Amino acid sequence: MELLERLVTLFAENGYLAVFIALLLCGAGAPLPEDITLVAGGVITGLGYGNVHVMFGVGMAGVLVGDAGMFLLGHHYGARIRQWRLVARVLTPERYAKVQEKFERYGNRLMFIARFLPGMRTAVFITAGSTHRVSFLRFFLLDGSAALISVPIWVYLGYFGANNHEWLAMWIRRGQNGLWLFGGLVVLVVLLLWWRHRRRVACETGPR
């Protein structure tokens, strides 16, 4: 909670712009948890330093612009971007291999799943852009759909828990576990639908 308190102080003094910039840094792979940043944005609105609905919009904008920036950098510079010093710290050879394995397993659906994979999100988006595995529009729709789930949860959690730190800390832990569970359920549903589609196609194109 120490980081949360620091962010609350920073955001209360500097407003929406500070939240937006912090989320851009999250998207760029800075060691700053996106969920805690969004919660802090919600907390300051609960303390009267802003409007929670505006903060939700700022949160969505910061998350999507940050993610899109990483995707477009990868798309523009291709494999060369992995040679950049700052990118190399985020996208290590081991992490790149892990992302490639997940692409082979989940395909473009990984763009949605990545929002629920802390520590992997930036690497996934850079890799997706550099390998041209997915169009920007498809990436934006998948990432945006996932953000519409995670962003309001954290922002409004911070808003409702602004004056009760113990309650807030408890629900942050539950929210983190819940999002992991939700992400896992989404993956299972997607895989089930994909398997049923493949089975139906196989039946339709099989020997008659």
Image (spheres, grey):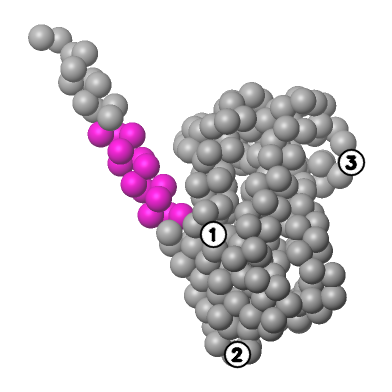
Q: Earlier in the sequence, mark 2 or mark 1?
A: 1
Residue 94 versus residue 25: which sits nearer the camera? 25
Mark 1 and mark 3: span between their CA atoms? Answer: 30 Å
> Where is mark 2, residue-wise?
164
**Picture layout, residue 75 above or below residue 88:** above
Find numbered disc 2 in the image and state the secondary structure of the residue it sits on. loop
Instruction: Write down the residue under mark 1.
Output: 150
- Closest to the camera, between mark 3 and mark 2, is 2
Q: Amino acid at mark 1?
A: Ser
Q: Residue furthest left?
A: 208
Q: Does 52 sit above or below residue 129?
A: below
Query: How crowded is the residue under tag 1: few (<14 C-alpha within 10 Å), some, or many (20+)?
Result: many
Q: Is residue 80 left or right of residue 50?
A: right
Magenta region's main secondary structure? helix
Magenta stretch encompasses residue 186: yes
Which label belongs to residue 85?
3
Q: Amino acid at mark 2?
A: Asn
Q: Residue at x 56, y 52 (%)?
A: 147
